[in-house]
Amino acid sequence: MPILKVENIKKSFGPLEVLKQISFEVNKNDVIAVIGPSGSGKSTMLRSLVHLEELDGGSISVNGNYIVKDGIYSKPQQLKEITSEMGMVFQHFNLFPHLTVVENLELAPKLLKKGSAEQTRELSMELLSKVGLSDKADVLPSKLSGGQKQRVAIARALMRKPEVLLFDEPTSALDPELTGEVLRVMKDLAQEDMTMVVVTHEMEFAKEVANKAIFMDKGEIVESGSPVDLLNNPQMERTKAFLYRTLSK
Amino acid sequence: MSIDYFVSILIPMLEGARATVLLFLIAIIVSIPLGFLLTLIVRSSIKPLAYLANAYIYLMRGTPLLLQLLFIVFGLPLIPVVGEYLVLDRFTAACLGFILNYAAYFAEIFRGGLLAIDKGQFEAAKVLGLNRWQTMRKIVFPQMFRIALPAVANESVTLVKDTALLYAVAVPELLHFAQTAVNRDFTITPFLLAGVIYLIITLFLTLFFKWLERRLRFD
């Protein structure tokens, strides 16, 4: 059974249909790269998975539990429990600027009373060392580079041990020389069998790390399949046109 | 001009400065939390309450503080039937006026602080599982206060100077004693002295807020 099942989801902003009947599944250990031009609805799609966007129709379920079924959302408490299976990493990091790195990681577990203070500290230090930032634990985010901020954001998202980790263009706000360190952390996670859905413009990363790629355009999934096939040998005209534009840049 | 004369006018003026400082402290300590509460009400989902709070802020910011003070001190007792119960001690009445007026200004300052917080902060908090109140308490309010701090500092300095309006409702304060001495002795010295005392108070206040800003800085 897939961990995450998305069926015919729809959303409009006024007259503009941003998601038109999108369906796909995420299985355990999948790394799915979602690519497509800006305005194709890929971010909206990703955000709807954790209820940052409200859908007009369709269903999303996690391990068989429905966040939304045929356009009708579960009760808030249930919704919260189901979405807690997922972590999210944002394009602009969204770290809490008034809290130190380690406080950023520990705020939610402490407020939600997940485990003892010692367990929380142990986990936060373990995750900071995993992203290579043990020495920055007591530093404010403003003292970090973009790449470091994003690595902290990834560690923060991992604190609740999510079943699926969602990435919304995690390297798009970074200087080119800083994307490598973030992609490396994501690659490590993939090797540890983390299930991930990554909205990205990093085609090399998609080919190298993802086991499935989805190409979206104008609110629909145009084409999906193995990343190497999709990127090297696209079948649909729109995919070809997009890849041509992207690669010729 | 003798030292004796200087001391003889300084003592009542310092006495007056005590009223000035006391009014300032009472007004700021009560109006900041009250302003914060107003901000919350303005943003609350209970619409009638929000409208009421907005109307209140408009009223307080849209009319002169002097008019409000005169209204409370001299106006309220003139209201038929209930007026006789509304005769307050003048200093108390003035405190009330300052609190009611400044709360509206602080509410606007805090609202500006709230608007300046990136919506990504709310989204991150939501995805991490925080509820609305936890998000406000741990993420939003600390940033809001920090963002609002320079404006709060500025407003506080204005409040120090506005205490001189006590003069108009005949509560003896710093300026009152200066004016008395000027009229009596026909010399400009008391005015200069009053100016220096105001400067010293605002200097301390400015240094305090600068220190607070440094301590709470996170950007």
Image (tube, rainbow, N blue to C red):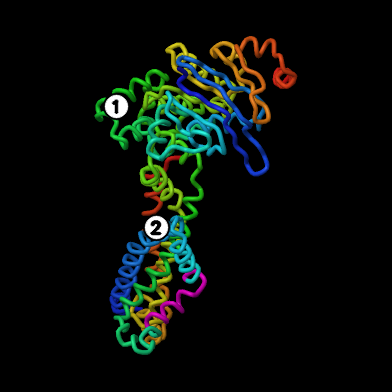
Say which residue label 1 marks: A121
Q: Nearer the viewer, residue B25 or B18?
A: B25
Amino acid beneath label 1: Arg
Who's the residue at 35% across and 34% down the image? A108
Locate the C terminus of chain A by quadrant.
Answer: top right
Q: Residue at x 56, y 11 (%)?
A: A208
Residue furthest to the front: A70
Report the Cα–Cα distance between label 2 and label 1: 34 Å
Asked whether, in this view, residue A130 is left or right of residue B58, the answer is left
- Give SS at disc 2: helix
Are discs 2 and 1 both within one chain? no
The spot of residue B107 in percent (x, y) is 44, 60
Q: Quadrant of the N terminus of chain A?
A: top left
Judge whether B187 appears above or below A245 on screen.
Answer: below
> Where is mark 2, residue-wise?
B36
Q: Nearer the viewer, residue B106 or A224?
A: A224
